[in-house]
Image (cartoon, grey):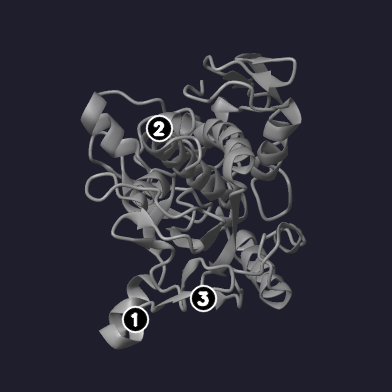
Amino acid sequence: VIDGCPSRLPLSLEDIQRDLDRRRPGQSRITTPRDEPDQAEILSGVFEGQTLGSPIAVVVRNTDARPEAYANLKDTYRPSHADYTYEAKYGIRNWQGGGRASARETVGRVAAGAIARKLLDAVAQIEVLAYVRRVHAIEAEIDPSRVTLAEVEATIVRCPDAAAAETMIARIDEARRAGDSLGGVVECVCRNVPPGLGEPVFDKLEADLARAMLSLPASKGFEIGSGFAGTLLTGSQHNDPFTVDASGRVRTVSNRSGGVQGGISNGEDIIVRVAFKPTATISLAQQTVDRSGQPVTLEARGRHDPCVLPRAVPMVEAMACLVLADHLLRQRAVAGRGA
């Protein structure tokens, strides 16, 4: 359920389905073989192709769940999963898959993000685009200011650097055949974001982006602009000097701030990166314990991604769209519709 969307926003089922298709399982050999069509249905909040201003309810039904594949995990704590922590908190857990910790829940995020994307484009022509920057130790060469959706979607790994993408795919294939998994980094660029979005203290734009990204399953790190690499620079090297362009607009010569200064957007591209760990469920034998504390050798069954990055791309985009849409609406409420 998506609440707070303004009325009279043009919205079709295709707008939502387009992003869901990029997230769905079974789309290539380097993703889980689970075959879910992820067909969305709009139940409420949209009439004759426009939003009504009331809550928008969207449902996506599971069609290929196989809970029996997890029967051997009923009393076993999977390494780096939420089995133990959920049981420690609630005293009970759903062992038929990941339960509430399953990445299956991101289907709702992507559906909501698609609606936020429509709002951002309609109100401010804001564009949000993510792509795989790194898989394991394979780093791509990408210019965030120039990359296009067509370049991202040209390969199954969603890396716009064709040479790096080929190596990434080969490395993921190798890990899959070995029963192992790989992690990496998704980078996201938000273009045409107006200056003034964000708040100065507790609702800083970059803080809300970090919170959103780190709520994604398997995420382990977040950085914006120069990120951790910026710690290797001096102040004189890191500062973004201001200038005025030919149209009279205040710009920065460089963008090490990543489009946000003091918690508020400065009008430059917002560039963030999200680190994702290797998929926790692997078919290699692993040592763990069961609920009684006895040692167990676990060989996981089921259908899992050897690398979450290709499907994480639309998830990262969705979370960026949701955060930016919230801040855009807040700024318009404060400064008026011209904001």
Is 287 placed left or right of 270 in the picture? left
Which residue is label 2 attached to?
Answer: 333
Q: Is residue 114 above or below residue 146?
A: above
Locate residue 9, reporting x and y percent. Answer: 64, 27
Q: Nearer the viewer, residue 254 or 148?
A: 254
Q: Nearer the viewer, residue 91 or 118?
A: 118
Locate residue 96, reporting x and y percent. Answer: 48, 27
Locate residue 276, reporting x and y percent. Answer: 46, 57
Which residue is label 1 attached to?
Answer: 238
Residue 137, which numbered label?
3
Mark 2: which amino acid? Ala
Is residue 157 visible in the rendered image? The answer is yes
Tag 2 secondary structure: helix
Marks 2 and 3, the one that precedes in the sequence: 3
Q: Nearer the viewer, residue 273 or 299?
A: 273
Which of pointers 3 and 1 indicates the residue nearer the eye? 1
Is residue 183 visible in the rendered image? The answer is no
